[in-house]
């Protein structure tokens, strides 16, 4: 199977994790995903490779020793089942990188110096940047004739106002150790805030938007006039909303308490707050579908967990409305935001005096396309807007290579 040539060019988007590679071949003009896939369980005895083109899915259960082998298998599937990458006219490979720190405020063409800087920023994202960098190095070696672009999750929040970016700690310590609010999911927040304004026929420069990116990881942002004013994630993705396995906001003294009184080490506390907290810590389940099932069965812990989850979202909505002096649009996005009508309803319940009112009928069910779910009389328009980080990465990559 081969694809028809794309005269405008396509972008291969790569998201490399510690034991996985996600990828999409994207038409940045039309916005279509021409092909997509996932390599999982890299380094284990047997890995899984899934390659999707249209309605056809090819799955291989094979050993995948490392990321190099994984990407070689992926390129082999493009040759074997399509679409042909030469015919698709790949003009760039776009790479997701989680942490750009104080260095990167936008996408950049990858070279040896950029690789070095991504590596140097790894202490700020130890679970992500090393894996992202591995993917970049492997892809550059296997696709040396195509420009590679790094797109950073933190870039959209690089120029946060000082009042939002700074923590109230010793400024010399903060400067020496690069402690500030970096945020995350910035590619999604930027994409949704821009696209939802276009969807509503508004000028983004005159629109105040709260974006609620709700998935296993979750974050909120305040975007005014197209610029990020605040975001819930901080130095790391741990801060902010309650997530699948992360606590979100918590008194920092909890860590001291657990170390002094529970005898927990730094690594044990890190594991607790990042991997054994959030919905999983409160209910044993990190999937909200399972939490809802437990609530329906009368599980009190699950009911409380759902209340904590949506209460936190509501607090951020109120806070960001205050930060921006009002809010024109609230956009729900990502897996939970797009599919969970219960969370959407509970998160905005009781905010009618702030001009925010959900229409129960419009809100019902999953939303695969942009959908207004507020009432006609709601002063704030509430929209479910599917995110597309791969398309955003593809378009930013095209901007960098000047195609």
Image: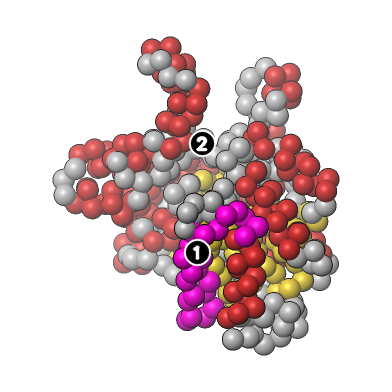
SS class of the residue under badge 2?
A: loop
Query: Magenta residues?
Result: 47-69
Residue 269: image quadrant is top left
Q: Nearer the viewer, residue 27 or 186?
A: 27
Q: Rounded to the nearest whole Å, what is the CA distance between mark 1 and mark 2?
A: 34 Å
Q: Judge whether residue 178 can be spotted in this image.
A: yes
The reply, left or right, for residue 12 in relation to residue 342 is right
Q: Residue 132: x and y, percent?
A: 65, 49
In the displayed structure, 383 sits above or below 233; it is below
**Quadrant of the image for the C terminus?**
bottom right
Check contact, mark 1 vs mark 2: CB within 8 A. Answer: no
In the displayed structure, 300 sits above or below 402; it is above
Q: Give the residue displayed 45% in from the left and 32% down from the top.
A: 271
Q: Nearer the viewer, residue 57 or 204?
A: 57
Which residue is label 1 attached to?
62
Residue 238 — which label? 2
Residue 11 painted magenta: no
The reply, left or right, for residue 277 in relation to residue 128 is left
Q: Give the residue displayed 54% in from the left and 39% down from the top.
A: 237
Residue 61 painted magenta: yes
Q: Earlier in the sequence, mark 1 or mark 2?
A: 1
Q: Give the residue displayed 22% in from the left and 48% down from the top.
A: 294
């Amino acid at each position: 199977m081969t694809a028809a040539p794309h005269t405008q060019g396509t972008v291969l988007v790569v998201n490399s994790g510690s034991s996985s590679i996600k990828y999409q071949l994207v038409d940045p003009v039309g916005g279509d995903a021409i092909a997509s896939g996932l390599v999982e369980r890299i380094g284990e005895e047997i890995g899984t490779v899934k390659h999707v083109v249209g309605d056809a899915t090819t799955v291989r259960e094979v050993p995948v020793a490392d990321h190099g082998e994984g990407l070689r298998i992926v390129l082999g599937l493009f040759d074997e089942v399509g679409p042909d990458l030469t015919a698709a006219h790949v003009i760039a490979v776009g790479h997701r990188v989680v942490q750009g720190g104080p260095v990167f405020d936008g996408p950049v063409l990858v070279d040896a110096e950029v690789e070095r800087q991504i590596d140097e920023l790894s202490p700020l994202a130890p679970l992500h940047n090393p894996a992202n960098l591995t993917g970049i190095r492997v892809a550059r070696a296997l696709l040396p004739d195509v420009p590679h672009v790094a797109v950073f999750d933190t870039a959209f929040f690089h120029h946060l106002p000082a009042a939002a970016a700074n923590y109230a700690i010793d400024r010399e310590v903060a400067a020496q150790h690069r402690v500030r609010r970096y945020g995350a999911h910035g590619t999604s927040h930027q994409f949704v805030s821009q696209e939802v304004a276009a969807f509503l026929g508004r000028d983004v420069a005159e629109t105040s938007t709260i974006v609620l990116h709700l998935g296993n990881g979750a974050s909120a942002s305040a975007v005014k006039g197209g610029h990020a004013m605040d975001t819930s994630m901080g130095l790391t993705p741990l801060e902010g909303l309650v997530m699948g396995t992360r606590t979100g906001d918590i008194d920092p003294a909890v860590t001291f308490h657990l170390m002094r009184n529970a005898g927990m080490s730094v690594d044990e506390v890190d594991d607790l707050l990042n991997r054994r907290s959030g919905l999983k810590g409160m209910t044993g389940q990190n999937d909200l579908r399972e939490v809802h099932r437990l609530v329906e069965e009368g599980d009190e812990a699950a009911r409380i967990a759902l209340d904590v989850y949506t209460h936190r979202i509501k607090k951020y909505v109120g806070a960001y409305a205050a930060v921006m002096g009002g809010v024109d649009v609230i956009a729900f996005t990502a897996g939970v935001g797009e599919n969970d009508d219960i969370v959407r309803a509970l998160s905005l319940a009781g905010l009618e005096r702030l001009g925010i009112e959900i229409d129960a009928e419009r809100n019902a069910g999953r939303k695969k396309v942009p959908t207004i779910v507020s009432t006609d009389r709601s002063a704030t328009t509430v929209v479910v807007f599917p995110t597309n980080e791969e398309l955003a990465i593809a378009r930013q990559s095209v901007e960098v290579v000047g195609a």
